[in-house]
Image (cartoon, rainbow, N blue to C red):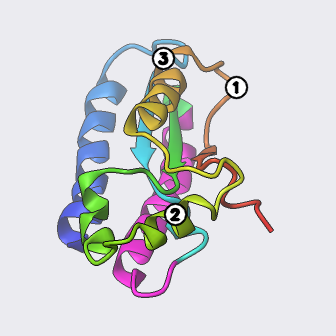
Amino acid sequence: MARVNLLGIVELCNAVVRVWQADDPQGWQRHIVILGSVNAQRPLPSQGAYSVIKAGLHAYAKCLSNDVAPHQIRVTVVAPGAILTPMQDPILQDDVDGQKRQQIARSALVARWGEAEEVARVAIWTAVDSPVFFTGAEVVVDGGYMVKR
Protein backbone atom coordinates (compact mmCIF):
# COMPACT_ATOMS: atom_id res chain seq x y z
CA MET A 1 0.00 0.00 0.00
CA ALA A 2 2.72 2.51 0.95
CA ARG A 3 4.75 1.61 -2.12
CA VAL A 4 1.99 2.87 -4.42
CA ASN A 5 0.17 5.49 -2.36
CA LEU A 6 3.23 7.22 -0.92
CA LEU A 7 6.35 6.25 -2.80
CA GLY A 8 4.52 6.20 -6.14
CA ILE A 9 3.45 9.82 -5.65
CA VAL A 10 6.97 10.79 -4.56
CA GLU A 11 8.48 9.16 -7.66
CA LEU A 12 5.92 10.78 -9.95
CA CYS A 13 6.49 14.24 -8.46
CA ASN A 14 10.26 13.82 -8.69
CA ALA A 15 9.95 12.84 -12.36
CA VAL A 16 7.77 15.87 -13.13
CA VAL A 17 10.14 18.17 -11.27
CA ARG A 18 13.14 16.86 -13.24
CA VAL A 19 11.37 17.69 -16.52
CA TRP A 20 10.21 21.09 -15.30
CA GLN A 21 13.66 22.01 -13.97
CA ALA A 22 15.12 21.43 -17.42
CA ASP A 23 12.66 23.94 -18.96
CA ASP A 24 12.89 27.69 -18.87
CA PRO A 25 11.13 29.11 -15.81
CA GLN A 26 7.45 29.79 -16.33
CA GLY A 27 7.18 32.50 -13.68
CA TRP A 28 5.61 30.33 -10.98
CA GLN A 29 2.94 28.97 -13.31
CA ARG A 30 3.87 25.32 -12.72
CA HIS A 31 2.03 23.83 -9.76
CA ILE A 32 1.97 20.33 -8.25
CA VAL A 33 -1.20 19.46 -6.34
CA ILE A 34 -1.00 16.42 -4.06
CA LEU A 35 -4.16 14.76 -2.77
CA GLY A 36 -3.81 14.37 0.98
CA SER A 37 -6.44 13.80 3.64
CA VAL A 38 -7.71 15.28 6.88
CA ASN A 39 -6.77 11.87 8.32
CA ALA A 40 -3.14 13.01 8.09
CA GLN A 41 -3.90 15.59 10.75
CA ARG A 42 -6.73 13.87 12.63
CA PRO A 43 -6.38 10.09 12.27
CA LEU A 44 -9.39 7.86 12.74
CA PRO A 45 -9.36 4.56 14.62
CA SER A 46 -8.60 1.51 12.46
CA GLN A 47 -7.23 3.71 9.65
CA GLY A 48 -3.64 3.89 10.86
CA ALA A 49 -1.90 2.84 7.65
CA TYR A 50 -3.98 5.23 5.55
CA SER A 51 -3.38 8.08 8.00
CA VAL A 52 0.38 7.47 8.10
CA ILE A 53 0.63 7.38 4.30
CA LYS A 54 -1.33 10.62 3.96
CA ALA A 55 0.75 12.26 6.71
CA GLY A 56 3.83 11.23 4.75
CA LEU A 57 2.44 12.94 1.64
CA HIS A 58 1.74 16.11 3.61
CA ALA A 59 5.32 16.14 4.95
CA TYR A 60 6.75 15.35 1.51
CA ALA A 61 4.80 18.25 -0.03
CA LYS A 62 6.31 20.67 2.48
CA CYS A 63 9.82 19.40 1.74
CA LEU A 64 9.19 19.48 -2.00
CA SER A 65 7.87 23.05 -1.76
CA ASN A 66 11.22 24.15 -0.39
CA ASP A 67 13.21 22.08 -2.88
CA VAL A 68 11.46 23.39 -5.99
CA ALA A 69 10.91 27.04 -5.04
CA PRO A 70 14.23 28.09 -6.63
CA HIS A 71 12.80 26.72 -9.91
CA GLN A 72 9.57 28.70 -9.50
CA ILE A 73 7.45 25.56 -9.02
CA ARG A 74 4.61 25.62 -6.49
CA VAL A 75 3.35 22.68 -4.40
CA THR A 76 0.06 22.40 -2.53
CA VAL A 77 -1.82 19.64 -0.71
CA VAL A 78 -5.59 19.34 -1.01
CA ALA A 79 -6.91 17.47 2.03
CA PRO A 80 -10.48 16.20 1.71
CA GLY A 81 -12.67 15.06 4.56
CA ALA A 82 -15.55 12.58 4.24
CA ILE A 83 -16.17 12.34 0.51
CA LEU A 84 -18.71 9.80 -0.70
CA THR A 85 -16.75 7.63 -3.12
CA PRO A 86 -16.39 3.87 -3.65
CA MET A 87 -13.45 4.01 -1.21
CA GLN A 88 -16.06 4.39 1.55
CA ASP A 89 -17.86 1.16 0.63
CA PRO A 90 -15.95 -1.02 3.13
CA ILE A 91 -16.66 1.47 5.93
CA LEU A 92 -20.37 1.63 5.10
CA GLN A 93 -21.01 -1.98 4.06
CA ASP A 94 -22.62 -2.94 7.38
CA ASP A 95 -24.59 0.30 7.63
CA VAL A 96 -27.97 -1.14 6.66
CA ASP A 97 -29.99 1.47 8.55
CA GLY A 98 -27.84 4.45 7.46
CA GLN A 99 -26.88 5.41 11.02
CA LYS A 100 -23.12 5.31 10.42
CA ARG A 101 -23.50 7.31 7.22
CA GLN A 102 -25.51 9.97 9.07
CA GLN A 103 -23.09 10.02 12.01
CA ILE A 104 -20.16 10.67 9.68
CA ALA A 105 -22.11 13.38 7.85
CA ARG A 106 -22.95 15.11 11.16
CA SER A 107 -19.25 15.15 12.15
CA ALA A 108 -18.76 18.25 9.95
CA LEU A 109 -20.21 21.74 10.20
CA VAL A 110 -21.77 21.21 6.77
CA ALA A 111 -23.64 18.12 7.93
CA ARG A 112 -23.38 16.03 4.79
CA TRP A 113 -20.88 13.98 2.86
CA GLY A 114 -18.73 15.89 0.41
CA GLU A 115 -18.75 15.20 -3.29
CA ALA A 116 -15.71 14.35 -5.40
CA GLU A 117 -16.52 17.28 -7.69
CA GLU A 118 -16.12 19.70 -4.76
CA VAL A 119 -12.59 18.43 -4.12
CA ALA A 120 -11.80 18.48 -7.83
CA ARG A 121 -12.93 22.11 -8.13
CA VAL A 122 -10.57 23.13 -5.33
CA ALA A 123 -7.69 21.15 -6.85
CA ILE A 124 -8.28 22.74 -10.26
CA TRP A 125 -8.48 26.23 -8.77
CA THR A 126 -5.27 25.54 -6.85
CA ALA A 127 -3.41 24.34 -9.94
CA VAL A 128 -4.79 26.79 -12.49
CA ASP A 129 -6.16 29.98 -10.94
CA SER A 130 -4.56 30.42 -7.53
CA PRO A 131 -2.24 33.39 -7.01
CA VAL A 132 1.53 32.93 -7.22
CA PHE A 133 1.87 33.65 -3.50
CA PHE A 134 -0.17 30.49 -2.82
CA THR A 135 2.35 27.69 -2.33
CA GLY A 136 3.37 25.25 0.38
CA ALA A 137 -0.19 25.24 1.72
CA GLU A 138 -2.56 22.54 2.88
CA VAL A 139 -6.08 23.27 1.66
CA VAL A 140 -8.68 21.44 3.71
CA VAL A 141 -11.94 20.57 1.92
CA ASP A 142 -13.93 18.93 4.70
CA GLY A 143 -17.12 20.88 5.31
CA GLY A 144 -15.70 22.12 8.61
CA TYR A 145 -14.88 18.68 10.07
CA MET A 146 -11.47 19.76 11.38
CA VAL A 147 -12.84 22.74 13.30
CA LYS A 148 -16.12 21.32 14.59
CA ARG A 149 -16.26 21.01 18.36
Q: Where's residue 91, x and y in %?
A: 32, 73
User: Is 91 left, or right, of 32 in this rendering?
Assistant: left
**Going 62% across and 35% down the picture, which residue do you hit?**
135
Q: CA distance from mark 3 to mark 1?
A: 13 Å
Name the quadrant of the C terminus.
Answer: bottom right
Membership of 32 in magenta stretch: no
Label 3: state its secondary structure: helix
Residue annotated with mark 1: 133
Label 2: state its secondary structure: helix
Mark 2 or 3, which is nearer the eye?
2
Residue extending farthest to the bottom is 46
Q: Are discs 3 and 1 less than 8 Å apart at CB?
A: no
Q: Magenta stretch mostly in which secondary structure?
A: helix
Say which label, 2 or 3, has the lower sequence index: 2
Residue annotated with mark 2: 102
User: Is 143 left, or right, of 28 in this rendering?
Assistant: right
Q: Where's residue 123, x and y in %?
A: 47, 31
Name the quadrant of the N terminus.
Answer: bottom left
Total residue callouts: 3
Say which label, 3 or 1, has the lower sequence index: 3
Say which label, 2 or 1, has the lower sequence index: 2
**Going 76% across and 60% down the picture, which residue do you hit?**
147
Residue annotated with mark 3: 128
Mark 2 or 1, which is nearer the eye?
2
User: Is 10 left, or right, of 138 in this rendering?
Assistant: left
* Classed neighbour count for the residue bearing mark 1: other residues with Cα under 10 Å, few (<14), some (14–19), many (≥20): few
Range drawn in magenta: 44-69
Question: Toward which corner of the image does residue 56 lie, by quadrant?
Answer: bottom left
Disc 3 marks a residue whose amino acid type is Val
